[in-house]
Image: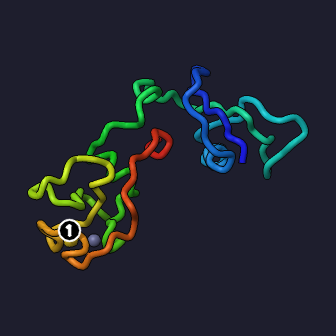
Amino acid sequence: MSAVLVLNADCGPLQRVSLRHAVRMLFRQVAVVHEAEPDRRIGVYPMPTVVRLVSYVVTRWRHSRGPAWSRAGVLARDNRTCAYCGAAASTIDHVLPRSRGGANEWANTVAACGRCNNRKGDRTPPEARMPLRVRPFAPSWAVLS
Ligand SMILES: [Zn+2]
């Protein structure tokens, strides 16, 4: 699958994404086709080789690995959905509890509803018998945009 270059709204290059990801960005109207392969289409779009973001993305993300960890970011990444029960989430749970050295990191934090967060307490998911429905990951800027 060919990679598509993503440009910022000011045409500065940001990163490469898969064609599928690029098409999803077009579909969500986050980006528009900037350059396309001649005479090739993917669905309703010209086959993109370069797409351009509709709104400008803060460029401190451009050369870093991704956005810095934040509580709001974890909630956005997980669509405000509890990683344990799927209910609406408004809190952050540390997979390895902070009291046991768990860090404020993308891979160690998930969105959780207050009930699950209380129930889990200072235990790990296996100890609490509360399996994670999703594996926490460090998002790229595109996930949070
Ligand atoms: Zn829950």
Residue drawn at point x = 26 percent, y = 59 percent: 90
Label 1 CB-ligand 1 distance < 8 A: no
Return the residue at label 1: 124
Q: Residues within 10 Å of mark 1 (few under 14, many from 20)?
A: some
Please name whichever residue, 91 or 95, is drawn nearer the observer in this view of the structure. Answer: 95
In the image: residue 12, left or right of residue 64: right
Q: Where is residue 138 in the image (x, y as percent from the top left)?
A: 39, 47
Three-letter residue code for mark 1? Thr
In the image: residue 62, left or right of residue 52: left
Q: Position of residue 129 (x, y in %)?
A: 24, 79
Residue drawn at point x = 64 percent, y = 45 percent: 18
Residue drawn at point x = 36 percent, y = 57 percent: 136
In the current view of this chain or complex, which residue is farthest to the bottom? 129
Question: Which quadrant does ligand 1 occupy?
Answer: bottom left
Please name whichever residue, 13 or 123, is drawn nearer the observer in this view of the structure. Answer: 123
23, above or below 55, in the image:
below
Residue drawn at point x = 48 percent, y = 29 percent: 57
Q: Where is residue 134 in the image (x, y as percent from the top left)?
A: 40, 65
In the current view of this chain or complex, which residue is farthest to the right? 39
Q: In which quarter of the image is residue 47?
A: top right
Q: Position of residue 65 (x, y in %)?
A: 42, 35
